[in-house]
Image (cartoon, helix red, strand yellow):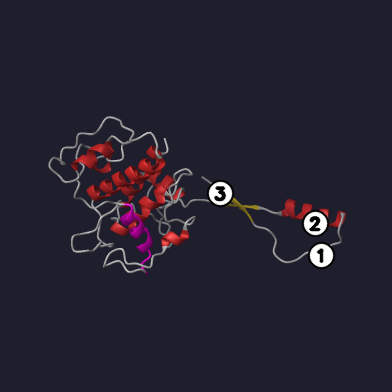
Amino acid sequence: MLKSTFNFFSGSLTAKTGAGTAAIILLCALTTKPVVAQVPSFSDVDTDIYAKEIQEAVEIGLIAGFTSNNTFRPTLELTREQMVSMVINALSQLPPSPLTVPSEQAPDLLKTTNKPYRDVEVTRWSAGKIEWAKENEIIIGYSDGTFRPTQIVTRAELIAVLRKAVEYGENTRRSGGIKRQQAITFSDISAHWGQKAITEMSAYCGVATPVNETGNAFFPNLGTQRNYAAAATLRMLNCMNK
């Protein structure tokens, strides 16, 4: 998706009122050149199985790449605070509704005066989003009162949070309920604490899928890579918008 902006002249123009003013305005309009802002084409995602979804997720602002070298680093593992940020970015993309989430449109919610967890300082970049997600029961911390924001998030944890985000979004917007398709029978989630959420989210527009989209194993305890996190969150958003 391309966004166009215009590079208007800087400086001042002095002219008499009437035809002279009109001529200057017309001249500015004719000589102004459009500047097209394009989403980066990352150098390291061309062969990634999630390449198309990564690009779309970046386009709509769910996640960003690394501007220092124009990479996305698709196999880099996601942290818990990064997961929260991505999920909230997705919720902010929903159509107009009673839903108010921390975003550029609601900047006050991006800040907090209270520590949401004892290891999340109010000055931390993610503090406002973590507090909002906690208050709306999208995330939970650990029994010792910590959130561990820089800890790698597992694939099961990602799906659990995405499931909570769906519940929040659907209930708040009073929409038609959870959409379903044929659930995937994974070979490695039996008796796992995340089994129910993983199975349900596989039936929710294919949010939960096998590692690298092959085989029938979900690998619930594996660290979540940025490529799958972007794809799964995008799928959730698209499903909620249907």
For the residue carrying disc 1, how many other residues have a C-alpha within 10 Å: few (<14), some (14-19), or many (20+)? few
Q: Is residue 6 visible?
A: yes
Provide the residue span drawn in magenta.
Answer: 123-136
Indicate the amino acid at tag 3: Lys
Q: Say which residue appears at 36% left-offset and 57% top-offset.
A: 132
Nearer-N-terminus badge (2/3): 3
Above-or-below relation of 193 to 78: above
Instruction: Give whichever of 115, 42 is nearer the camera.
Output: 115
Q: What amino acid is labelled 2 in the image?
A: Ile
- Return the residue nearer the eye: 103 or 59: 103
Q: Secondary structure at mark 2?
A: helix
Q: Is residue 22 left or right of residue 128?
A: right
| Residue furthest left in the image | 191
Tag 2 near tag 3, CB within 8 Å: no
- Per the rendering, the mark at residue 14 is 1
Q: Which residue is mark 2?
A: 24
Task: Tell me the residue at 35%/35% (across/down).
Answer: 177
**In magenta segment, residue 19:** no
> Would you identify the image quadrant in which residue 103 lies?
bottom left
| Residue at x-position 38% and y-position 61% | 128
Instruction: Check disc 2: other Cα within 10 Å, few if <14, some if 14-19, many if 20+.
Output: some
Q: Quadrant of the C terminus?
A: top left
- In the shown orientation, is residue 158 left or right of residue 1? left
Q: Residue at x 87, y 54 (%)?
A: 19
